[in-house]
Amino acid sequence: MRKIVLVALSCTTLAACGSGGILNRERPDEFAVQRQAPLVVPPDFNLQPPAPGAPRPTEGTAAEQALDVLFGGPAARSAVETSALERAGSADPGIRTAVGDPQTNTVAKGRVTRDIIAAPEGDGQAASAVIPG
């Protein structure tokens, strides 16, 4: 009986190795592979190599890059924006220090505005946020 089981198991294992066996699966055709054309950089004879140590012409300074990211770069202002800016006029250069002065007259905007104006100066390390419930 043992020999019959061993022969049957061997036949089953050997049959599984064939193309129509239990482990039949889709395989890629290794002969269907095609060669790709090599990458070619087209010549551009108008480009000139940069001078050693010269700044890159397209990058600009870090401040200019930040302004471009924040405000979209130099763009023409609309007529409404131009009119609003002309009517507003220019701000006094020391306006931020004058707002915190006790002698400055302000419009009562509520407790939040008073808290902001009365906030102590500093680097904000001791600041905390309170969410009213």
Image (tube, grey):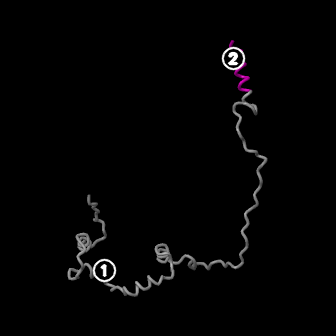
Q: How packed is label 1: few (under 14 Cα within 10 Å), some, or many (20 or more)?
A: few
Toward the viewer: 27 or 77?
77
**Disc 1 secondary structure class:** helix
Give how far across and how far down residue 114 sits, in percent: 23, 73
Residue located 73% across and 23% down the image? 11
Amino acid on which the number 1 mark rests in the picture: Arg
Dominant secondary structure, magenta: helix
Q: Position of residue 77 (x, y in %)?
A: 48, 82
In the depicted structure, whether residue 38 falls above or below residue 111: above
As drawn, the residue found furthest toward the front would be 80
Residue 87's mark? none
Residue 65, given in percent of the width and then of the height, sits at: 50, 75
Snapshot quadrant of residue 39: bottom right
Find the magenta span and give its range: 1-14
Residue furthest to the top: 1
Residue 26 coordinates in the image, percent (x, y): 71, 40
Residue in the picture at 65% in, 77% down: 49
Instruction: Specify the label residue 5 is tagged with.
Output: 2
**Left or right of 33, for residue 104:** left
Residue shown at the point (29%, 62%) measured from the top left: 129
Left or right: residue 104 compared with residue 72:
left
Foreground: disc 1 or disc 2: 1
Q: Is residue 64 left or right of residue 89?
A: right
Residue 123: quarter of image: bottom left
Whether 77 is among the magenta residues is: no
Residue reaching furthest to the left: 103
Query: Compared with residue 59, is residue 93 higher up or lower down, i.e. above or below?
Result: below
Q: Amino acid at mark 2?
A: Val
**Going from the N terminus, do you reach mark 1 or mark 2 first?**
2
Query: In which quadrant is the N terminus drawn?
Result: top right
Categorize mark 2 by other alpha carbons within 10 Å: few (<14), some (14-19), many (20+): few
Which residue is label 1 attached to?
96
